[in-house]
Structures are given as C-alpha cells and as structure tokens.
Amino acid sequence: MASILHPLRIGKHIAQYPIIQGAMAVGVSGAKLAGAVAKAGGVGTIASLGLGLHSPYFHQRKRGSFFEANRLALIDELTKARSISPDGAIAVNILVATKDYSVLAQIAAAQGANLIITGAGLPLTLPQYTADYPDVALVPSVSNFFSAQLICQTWQRQYNRLPDALIVENCQRVGGHFSQCEDANSSGFSIESVISQLREYFEQYLGVKMPLIVSGGISDRTDIDRILEIGADGVQIGTRFITTEECDADERYKDYHLQASAADIVTVPSPVGKPSRALRNFFAEQAITDSSTKLERRCIANCLETCLCRDTGKTYCLLQALSKAALGDVEHGLIFSGANVRYTERIMSVTELMAELTQPHKPMVSNVVVQRKNPLQVN
C-alpha cells in the first residue's frame, strides 16, 4: 500500500505535496500551468527561456529587444501566476547557459518567486544575484554527485551558504537536454547510487538535511512511491503536465503528446552541444540526419552563451524550433518529451491530475481496448 505523501519544505517554503512541476520552454509552462499546480498543492514552475519571444515587448529589428522582452514578460508571468495562486509555491526555472541568466535571476527574486531552479550548467555564482532576497530558495539541477559537490563547495567558500534543495536528473528518462549517461548502469552512476551518495555527503559530512528531488520519467503514483523509497524527498514531473487543460502550449502540441508511445521517443542533437529527448516528427528526423536543406539555421535572438547554430552554422535555432512546436506546428518544431508517454488517454485539469498523483495507487482494470492510428509515424 502506498504511503501518505508528506509536504515538501524547500528553504522557507512548503508545498502540500512533494511534487515540482518541471519547466518546459518555450511557452509550454507559463503562468497558467505554474499557477494551477501551485494552487493544487505542488510547486508550479515558469520556464523563463524565450518568454518574451511572442510578447508585445519584442521587436526583432531592435537591438537588445529580446532580452528586454524576456525581462518584462517574466514580470507579467509571475504576476499572473500569483493571481492564480496567491499563497502557493511558485518557481522560476532559469538556464545558466543563456545570456540573460543573471538578469532573469535578479528579476525572479525581486518579483516574488519563491524558488529559483537552474538548469543547463552549474550555477556557481547564483547566490550573488539573489543576495538581497534571502527568502528565495535556490535549487540547482544536477546529474551526478560531483556536480553537486562542486556547487556546494563553491557556495560555501564564496557565499557561506548551501543550496536549499537539489534536483537530481535521471539522464536515462528526463525530457529535453540531458547529460551523456553511458555510465548510468555502472556502479555509482545509477539514480539510486547518486541519491545515496548525496544523502551521505550532506548528512554525514556537512551535517544538514538536504531535500533531494528526482526528475526524469515520472508519470504516476507508482513512480512517485518508487522514487521516495530510494531516499528522495520529492519528484519533478514535466511531461505529464503537458496534457492538462492549463498547460500554456497549443492544443495541437498537447494532442501530439497524448497520442505518443514509447516508440516515438528519439534522441535529437541540439545547438547547446548536448543530446535531447524528444518526440519523433519531421523536424526531429531532419535534425537527426542534419539535413542542410530542411533546417532553419538562422539565429533569431542570440540567446545562448554558446550555440552551434549561431557560432558554426550547425544544427538549428533552438528557440525557434521549440517555439514553433509550442505554437502548434507539431511537424516543423522540436517537441521535448520525457521517456514516459504512456500515461493517459485524455486531457485533464491540473486539479484532477494532482489528485491522481497524490492518491494511493490503484491498478487500473479495463475491458476496453482502444485502437487508434499513431499520428507520429513519419513516412
């Protein structure tokens, strides 16, 4: 029998349930989704990457307009999310690899974000950007013990503090970009081993109880219980929240996920230099084969510190590829996805999904077999 889910405390903030909604850019997890998750008792997360791209603040021909638009759009999204959930836990996810990382961190802290979650790099200087807002919890995402140790040692030495929690990515299951994980099945590199190493490091060597949240391939209560049993304090779930009414993406994007199967998951190269996990479509096929005639290689915003598209003319514009998909062009955009896509037959509300995730697991019994053509097959 599944145990009762306990609240998740991160810094000074408490979520009713140990569930963090994962960040999904560009325009997939905005204020509507984050606010709804926070209201339902989880941690709702606004993805900051590309927020300003389709905002009224962005003027493509004006130098620096994209970064100013991001800043203003983030303020708007935080205001909207807070209006949906006045008392819930709301996070902003910021990518270290973006050029406006430090500015967005300062804006998020100043505008009332409860947590700042980072990804795509080691946030070794993050505390200096939020120093005036000590109540904001700082939560780096890591893929192994050594990254976590480096962050902790650097923060202790330079800022006399530790992270408020860590998100530990399971590279074999997480959606979007992931670190190379050829050693994931080796001793010491599995998600169970990483959690065990981190728990020992914090409790025995640093003398603290650090909340550890696992991300990657988690889609139902059975998955949650399994992760908590290996010693984690919570989970981060991204893909499952796409097929909700409140998800900020286009309905065609949601439906594409709704009808996907495990066979549709592919690994796609990315301009950030890491592989990414996505759904198979025309764009993914072209990116995998690196078709020079089909991919848009024009950099539209100069958003990344290092970009193979901008710097070498290889791969594609990440911002544009993600944006196209989220706006509903599900054949010519990049559709990130976690490894679990078998979880539901319909779009549901966040409230309903959170109730499903937080109730003890009951095996589903059905005599109905639904057969439908898979729209993801690429001819």
Image (cartoon, rainbow, N blue to C red):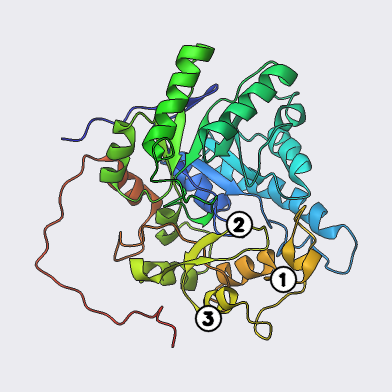
Q: Is residue 221 visible to us here?
A: yes
| Identity of the residue drawn at 50% across and 11% down | 207
**In the displayed structure, would residue 298 be above or below residue 364?**
below
Quarter of image, res 261:
bottom left
Kind of element beneath mark 2: loop
Q: Residue furthest right?
A: 63
Between the residue at mark 2 and the residue at mark 1, the CA separation in whole angstroms equals: 13 Å
- The reply to whether callout 2 and callout 1 are in contact (CB within 8 Å) is no
Give, as a three-letter code, the residue at label 3.
Phe
- Label located before the other in sequence (3 or 2): 2
- Residue, disc 2: 274
Q: Residue furthest bottom?
A: 379
- Residue, disc 1: 314
Q: Nearer the viewer, residue 185 or 201?
A: 185
Q: Nearer the viewer, residue 96 or 131?
A: 96
Q: Nearer the viewer, residue 187 or 76?
A: 187
Q: Residues within 10 Å of mark 2 (few under 14, many from 20)?
A: some
- Residue, disc 3: 282
Q: Residues within 10 Å of mark 3 (few under 14, many from 20)?
A: some
Q: Nearer the viewer, mark 1 or mark 3?
A: 1
Kind of element beneath mark 1: loop
Q: From the viewer's perspective, is 268 left or right of 379?
A: right
Give, as a three-letter code, the residue at label 2.
Lys
| Identity of the residue drawn at 59% across and 47% down | 46
Q: From the viewer's perspective, is 345 left or right of 71?
A: left
Between the residue at mark 1 and the residue at mark 3, the CA separation in whole angstroms equals: 18 Å
Q: From the viewer's perspective, is 338 left or right of 143?
A: left
Give, as a three-letter code, the residue at label 1.
Lys
| Identity of the residue drawn at 34% across and 66% down | 262
